[in-house]
Amino acid sequence: MPQNERKLLISRRRLLGFGAVGASSLLLAGCNDSISENPKFLNVIDKATELTYRAQRLILPRDKLAPEYSETDIAAEFRPNGSTSPSDPAYLALAKNNFVDWRLQVDGLVEKPLQLSLADLHALPAKTQITRHDCVEGWSCIGKWTGTPLSEVLNRAGVKPQAKYVLFHCADRFNAAGYPDDYQPGNPDSIAKGGEHYYESIDFVDAYHPQTLLAYDLNGQTLPIAYGAPLRLRLGRQLGYKQAKYVMRIELVNSFARFGSGKGGYWEDLGYQWYAGI
Ligand SMILES: Nc1nc2c(c(=O)[nH]1)N[C@H]1C(S)=C(S)[C@@H](COP(=O)(O)O)O[C@H]1N2
Ligand SMILES: [Mo]
């Protein structure tokens, strides 16, 4: 739940300033919360972004792979988190028609802007990997993801030399209190009322990393809405909040100053680190 995400953020601020507040987490079959006791994991949140980023980039080779697991390690039920049912009317209309009219827009600092349908994405080279998702709230889940490497899409668009970041625009919105305005069937009040869209950004080391996928399947099934249909980002080496769901547009930029509060992502604008390496 993003509420928990926000609570954790607040509690960690208290932890730094005014004494400890424990962060609780839910347990779900096949998922576990043991990483919350891993000090290395928690440290990631507290270090200055630039320091963490530089240290990790120095320590880890560019293409260091995240561990991959076997079929038997897959969680019985992958845990959905954050937005699980976007209420944006345009998104709902696309979902109703199984996203056949959805197009991934790829633009910004590219040679050739693209508009890709799901069929176009399925026609690109595909990759399947079983990896662990680590949420900043302190739980993890192993799932099998299938999609096309982000590099396949970037290479077709042609990255201009000025581009520094890959920015993902998502369909879901959050209100000022940090709650996703998830759609509740039968409740028109739950339709998005103009909150901020979720967004995220990564650099080109991660964008070209072989385990960075634009995923359209989870555990051999079409990606369900709760997990980011029709397309979501999967990064092997960063925390959950970087893994943008409901990706509508990929924009190549040389700065993220003009988006949100300029920190490169929805949760980053609220104080999370931009580089959330694990
Ligand atoms: N668009 C969008 N992407 C998102 C979120 C969100 O609320 N909206 N939540 C993030 C967080 S905090 C986590 S842990 C993961 C959850 O992915 P899951 O629902 O597949 O577990 O998605 C990330 N990507
Ligand atoms: Mo998360």
Image: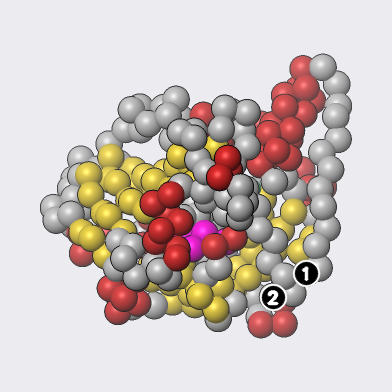
Task: Answer yes or no: is residue 58 visible.
Answer: no
Q: Residue at x 82, y 17 (%)?
A: 18
C-alpha gap between disc 1 and disc 2:
7 Å
Q: Which mark is residue 113?
A: none
Residue found at the very far top of the displayed protein: 18
**Residue 143, relative to residue 53: is it above or below?**
below
Q: Nearer the viewer, residue 180 or 1?
A: 180
Residue toward you, 267 or 236: 267
Q: Amino acid at mark 2?
A: Ile
- The quarter of the picture where residue 3 lies is top right
| Residue named by callout 1 | 30
Does mark 1's beta carbon lie closer than 8 Å to ligand 1?
no
- For mark 2, give the secondary structure: loop
Q: Amino acid at mark 1?
A: Gly
Name which residue lies at 61% across and 55% down.
185
Residue 132, horizontal then vertical, whole percent: 64, 64
* Residue in the picture at 72% in, 27% down: 10
At x 55%, y 37%, the residue is 174
* Contact (Cβ within 8 Å) of mark 1 with mark 2: yes
Q: Nearer the viewer, residue 46 or 12?
A: 12
Locate residue 24, reporting x and y percent. Answer: 84, 43
Query: Looking at the image, is 144 positioned above or below residue 33?
Result: below
Up-down relation of residue 84 to residue 128 (above or below): above
Residue annotated with mark 2 = 74
Apparent side of residue 272 relative to residue 250 in the rendered image (left or right): right
Crowd band around label 1 with a 10 angstrom C-alpha radius: few (<14), some (14–19), many (20+): some
* Upstream in sequence: badge 1 or badge 2: 1
- The segment highlighted magenta reads 227-232
Element carrying mark 1? loop
Secondary structure mostly taken by the magenta-highlighted segment of the chain: loop
Please provide percent x and percent y for residue 248. Answer: 37, 53
